Amino acid sequence: MNNVKYYYRFKAIIIDDFNEKDIKKHNKELNSFEDLADRFHKLRVAFDNDSSEQVNIIVNAFPALYGAVSELSVGSSVKRKLFSKEIKSKNFALMITKSSLDNIDVLGYETNDFEEVKQIFYDFITKQALPNLIKWKHLG
């Protein structure tokens, strides 16, 4: 598994997770976890300021980890009450995409813990490790 390369992007678009050329076309190669420091800062600021600005971090692994996990992403989510500025809920929404040639499976998890989000990404990138998926929900 040492030959895994990581790529990142900040815009949510659909790409072919099995085609390294397509991944490279839409992403930048990730040299280390620290390459994402500025973006994690923006994610935290958007969350702390209840911003409706969409801040995404999307990391692709190529080849896919464990033969299936090709993408880890997070975005901040602020939901407001209908016709109001009052906040209904806010969290970090994480997703893991597991792909095979004929199937895409998406798992989702929501948390308010910024340090947990950073740790999940750190482990994914530096240790090629997945989070404990017991609390994650199948999204499709």
Image (cartoon, rainbow, N blue to C red):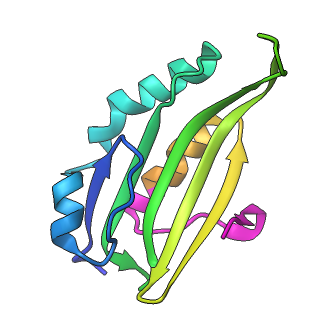
Q: Position of residue 111 (x, y in %)?
A: 71, 42
- What residue do we see at 54% from left, 63% from top? 96
- What residue do we see at 30% from left, 50% from top? 8
Query: Which residue is nearer to you in this view: 87 or 30?
Result: 87
Quadrant housing residue 50: top right
Residue farthest bottom in this picture: 102
Left or right of residue 20: residue 111? right
Up the image or down, 94 lies above or below 11; here it is below
**The N terminus: image quadrant:** bottom left
- Magenta segment includes 36: no
**The C terminus: image quadrant:** bottom right
- What residue do we see at 15% from left, 69% from top? 21
Query: Which residue is nearer to you in this view: 64 or 117?
Result: 64
Left or right of residue 34: residue 14? right
Up the image or down, 27 lies above or below 22; here it is above
Up the image or down, 85 lies above or below 130; here it is above
- Magenta segment includes 125: yes
Q: Position of residue 127 (x, y in %)?
A: 40, 65
- What residue do we see at 33% from left, 38% from top? 36
Q: Which region is colored magenta?
A: 123-140
Query: Which residue is nearer to you in this view: 125 or 12?
Result: 12
Q: Position of residue 62 (x, y in %)?
A: 28, 72
